[in-house]
Image: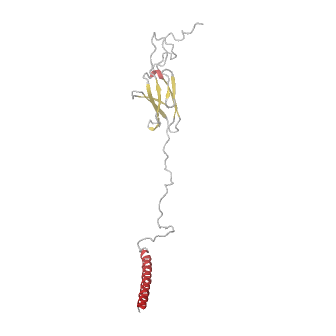
Amino acid sequence: MKTKIALLIIISFFLASCEMATATQESEDVNDVATEAPATEAPVTREPVVTEEPIATELPTEAPTEPPLACVTLLTPINGVEIPPVGKVTFSWTPMDEAGNYVLNIILPSGETVSFETDQTFRDRYMEAFVAGGEYQWQVVAQNLDGSEICVSEVATFDKPAYEKPKGDGGGNDGSGGNDGNDGGGGGSDDGEEGDEG
């Protein structure tokens, strides 16, 4: 009888454990059903989801109606060059079709700006007219025919030693001809008399 009771207990135990396994599987099935998304949420799938509205992920492909206007490019003197204290320097830049006039601005080491107007893409200047030594800056303003500003170029720089006037009687044989860039001429009645030692 003890054996029958032990067998009965073992069988009961076995049946109870089978019931638990079945109940666990049923609860897992219930969980699978419970994890299905309610009607307000999108189900989680491994396939891509297509929505009704496209999502913008690329930049617009339309070009602006008016591209920015490129200004003149400064050519000479090249940026950062050292210029001698005496002699002619040609400031030049690229042309601009829309421009009717240009203004060359030279910014002195003191910060003062000296401006020169021209309808050409260059302007000659004599360096002895700029007495101070140091770093100079220059830029060009392109203007319409009516004088309104179209654009301003980038700034370029050049270095120049200070100009020292020649000492003496002013006869000047320094190659400048006595021209300081202001009076347009050389210096009096003895022009051409020097150098006739033949």
Choose between 21 and 25: the one closer to the eye. Answer: 21
Residue 77 on image: x %, y % = 51, 29
| Coordinates of residue 58 in the picture (x, y in percent) | 49, 57
Q: Is residue 28 above or below residue 84?
A: below
Furthest-right residue in this view: 198
Q: Quadrant of the N terminus?
A: bottom left
Tell me if residue 95 comes above or below residue 68 in the rendering: above
Q: Residue at left 44%, top 81%?
A: 21
Closer to us: 68 or 32: 32
Residue 73 against residue 165 in the figure, above or below: below
Q: How many marks?
A: 0
Q: Residue at x 47, y 23 (%)?
A: 127
Instruction: State the residue lying farthest toward the top.
Output: 197
Q: Can residue 127 be seen here?
A: yes
Any part of residue 105 in sight: no
In the image, 174 versus 177, the foreground residue is 174
Indicate the position of residue 142 as horizontal and vertical percent values.
Answer: 47, 36
Q: Position of residue 133 (x, y in %)?
A: 43, 23
Classify the position of the C terminus by image quarter: top right
Question: Image quarter for residue 165?
Answer: top left
